[in-house]
Image (cartoon, rainbow, N blue to C red):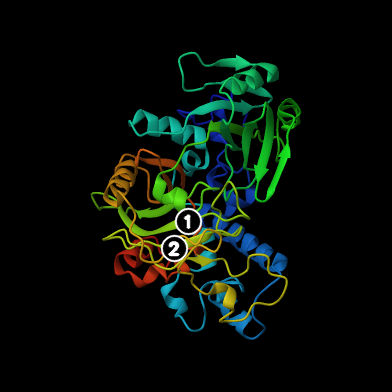
Amino acid sequence: MPPPSDPTRQRSPYLEYFQRDGHVADLPSATRKLLGIRAYQAMWSGYRWLKHEFQSRSGPQPPFRLALWRQGFFAESAAVYDFPRNDPGEYLSDFQQIHLGGWINEWDGLFNHKLGLRAFLLAQGLPQPHTAAFIYEGRILAEPFERGGRYVSDEEIEEHLRGEGEGAAWVVKPEDGSQGRGLFLLEYVEGAFRRHRGREVAPIDLRAFLASLEPARNGGQAGATLIERRLPQGQFWRELFPGSANTLRLLTLWTPGDPSPFIARAVQRVGSADTVPTDNWSGGGLSAPIDLATGRLGPGRTHPLKGAKRTITVGDPRSAPVERHPDTGALIAGAVLPCWNRITEVVLRAGASLPFNRMVGWDVLVSAENEPVILEANGHSDVNLLQVHGGLLADDRVRRFFEHYGAV
């Protein structure tokens, strides 16, 4: 890769950090140049698919496993999607999902980096969580979106956070992370900081943590960390499970030639005692389908392979739907989301404001004031938590979108 100062490199309107978006077209690969972007992406997707299968601990026995592979599905998808009871032809396969993300969204790097997306959404007048600090290459930028933003020391940011008072809480996460990896809740309780993740709560030496952040990773590619103030959620979502930020995932698709994007599928995610402070589905949270017309929730489902130590068979009871939250007893199936029309309005507005947006999974938290706040957007959204409630390709409009890109 040419250095940032190389005048021959196409310049980005964003910080140098956001140029490193992992897009196939940005890889300095002789193989990519020989094969072309599409062929290289297919080869790379195949490698990732095979790697996942070799590392997988669970799945059906041959020959059903071989039949799934021929159709592009992971072996574990038999349990997630309840094959063969359901028709695999109505589902976007795992290989298709991996392959599509590399080239459908030409500006996928913006979705991969939370700081860049946050700046764009703020410019559109959409509310965002308060960003207390952005940490990159060992430097700490306090209040990056405020006029008084400046670089500070470890000691200064610690005092800055301590100044928010007893009971303050922040979400600490990789700026380019996904699926809740590396994320934890930082709390200030009884004059001391503590780290809260899942069922584990422990004191944390904040200065030592900041000093431990690697200035670079992945062969020199710089990483970054965000510290953002925890956003209180609305009463409805707090009652579902108070220990996590319970977000909605809305998948929007924008077929080239159409005047605007549309919502293809939406689910309500709910955390559990195992996932605090996140609602990560593959980590033990729940996913409940949302009726797009009414905002009414269907039964929740957990990932059937969560914590699996053995082969999973079709019809495993762990994949059974639940009417109420297993930890709180809160009603899920049949509950109607408050301000559902407002939620869809905000997401469609955000999607339409990005002319390069084609396929995005939007993560939305509804605040205590019942205002939808887009926390993240995923240009390469996982589809298992969406399709666990039924195949995406059963919808003709969704199928036409993927047919346009030659995926089906």
Q: Amino acid at mark 2?
A: Ala
Residue 157 in view here: yes
Considering only order in the chain, which callout, 2 or 1, is on the residue closer to the N terminus? Answer: 1
Which quadrant of the view contains residue 50? bottom right
The answer to whether the residue labelled 1 contacts the one labelled 2, judged by CB atoms less than 8 Å apart, is yes
Q: Which mark is residue 71?
A: none
Secondary structure beneath dot 1 equals strand
Q: Is 155 drawn above or below residue 274 in the view shown?
A: above
Task: Label 2, secondary structure: give it.
Answer: strand
Q: CA distance from mark 1 to mark 2?
A: 6 Å
Q: Which residue extends farthest bottom?
A: 63
Is residue 1 at all visible to an observer of this figure?
no
> In this rendering, would 258 be left or right of 40?
left
Q: Which mark is residue 269?
A: 1
In the foreground, 377 or 331: 331
Q: Is residue 140 left or right of residue 14?
A: right
| Residue 65 rendering spot, x and y as whole percentages | 63, 80
Q: Residue sitting at 50 percent across and 46 percent down?
A: 245
Determine crowd level at label 1: few under 14, some 14-19, many 20+ residues with C-alpha closer than 10 A: many
In the rendered structure, the answer to whether residue 209 lies left or right of residue 275 reads right
Which residue position is annotated with label 2? 288
Instruction: Choose between 79 and 96: the one closer to the eye.
Output: 79
Q: Position of residue 268 (x, y in %)?
A: 43, 57
